[in-house]
Amino acid sequence: MPRILIVEDKDSLRAMLEEMLRAEKLEVRGIASGSQAVELLRSGEPVDLVLTDWRLPGADGLAVLDAALSLDPTLPVIVMTAFGSIEAAVDAMKRGAEDFITKPVDPDLLRLLVSRAIERRVRERESLLFEDNRSRSMPAIIGESPAIRSVQEEAQRVASTDATVLLEGESGTGKELFARAIHELSARRQRPFVAINCAAIPDSLLESELFGHERGSFTGALGRRLGKFELADGGTVFLDEIGELSAATQGKLLRVLQERSFHRVGGTIPIQVDIRILAASNRPLDRMVSQGLFREDLYYRVRVFPIRIPPLRDRPEDVEPLIDWFLGHLPQELGKKGIRIAPAARERLREYPWPGNVRELRNCLERAIILA
């Protein structure tokens, strides 16, 4: 069960947030001061997401954010801020916060932000895992096959350019991790990396999520909200499952790629941005183009440099290193010790085709460790 830390000094709001997130089957702990939150994070207590107010007694939201990211750079932190303090929230995003939400908190929006952040964290754990390598070199992928080494080399070559990259491959092959590696090896590495799962956000919310909105542009738009493209200025935007975009949103994305500008929902002033676009799809976009489901002009814009990540069944020699990696990490996460796999079981794992790729392998090993 994902573990959420809520940092909010107002007792009534903290209690409401705790109750709401527990109803979502999340393990929740509430703390009233920033200094207590920093102390808890530094104690090493497991946390999967931090939801923190920006103005706090003891230590402010920035101190909580810095403490969280210094201990785990992948830990999602969502910042709550009063309307009128948007600049502080944007600064938090630039410093590594996952997202922000204005007060009074919209319960539906908060559920969406928390769900999406948890999903991203789970995906990162379940996909191909990158290891640190030499300084500024391409992170090594867990695996020894020529196929995965070839993909690694392609990603390293394109990282130093500003070309738009389309990562193609089945679910669970690690497309987002390749995108993050490309960003980390690029000249934009000090700027934001913003990942958006186009399939996880309802179409009615996606346009506002990407481009932002002005106050009063639709029911519930109580203030101006900056979109992901604006928040990623100078950095990289990763559009996962780009094939799920509606025709209308495809057209607006095409304009961003062509002109590097867009309008917020309800806005009239063009917003200029300097971003690099990385995209991914587990569906064949060329077939979607021929079926009229995806714009041909957008297809050629995003497919400047295509990289196909092979499924695990096409590189069986990578199964063994992945098993060893997971056995070195999962038992500790699950509170188990002395876990080994019998040779016969290893052989069965090597022979299985893994239609769910690395994600399925990880889930299989996790279940086995829990039951051991």
Image (cartoon, rainbow, N blue to C red):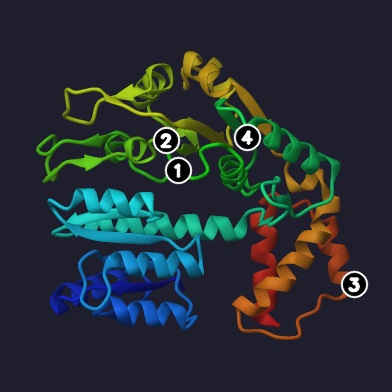
Distance in Å between CA atoms under marks 1 and 3: 46 Å
Whole-percent x and y of residue 283?
58, 33
Point out the image quarter for the C terminus.
bottom right
SS for dot 1: loop
Q: Badge 3: how crowded within 10 Å, few (<14), some, or many (20+)?
A: few
Pointer 4 or 3: first along the chain: 4
Q: Mark 4 = which residue?
A: 159
Count of numbered circles in the view: 4
Pointer 4 or 1: first along the chain: 4
Circle 2/circle 1 CB separation < 8 Å: yes
Q: Mark 1 = which residue?
A: 191
Distance in Å between CA atoms under marks 4 and 3: 40 Å
Q: Identify residue type, mark 4.
A: Ala
Q: Identify residue type, mark 3.
A: Pro
Circle 3/circle 2 CB separation < 8 Å: no
The answer to which image quadrant residue 265 occupies is: top left
Residue 58 relative to residue 231: left or right: left
Whole-percent x and y of residue 195?
46, 44
Q: Identify residue type, mark 1.
A: Arg
Instruction: State whether residue 169 is above or below residue 25.
Output: above
Q: Which mark is residue 343?
A: 3
Whole-percent x and y of residue 74?
50, 60
Q: Which mark is residue 234?
A: 2
Q: Badge 4: how crowded within 10 Å, few (<14), some, or many (20+)?
A: many
Pointer 2 or 1: first along the chain: 1
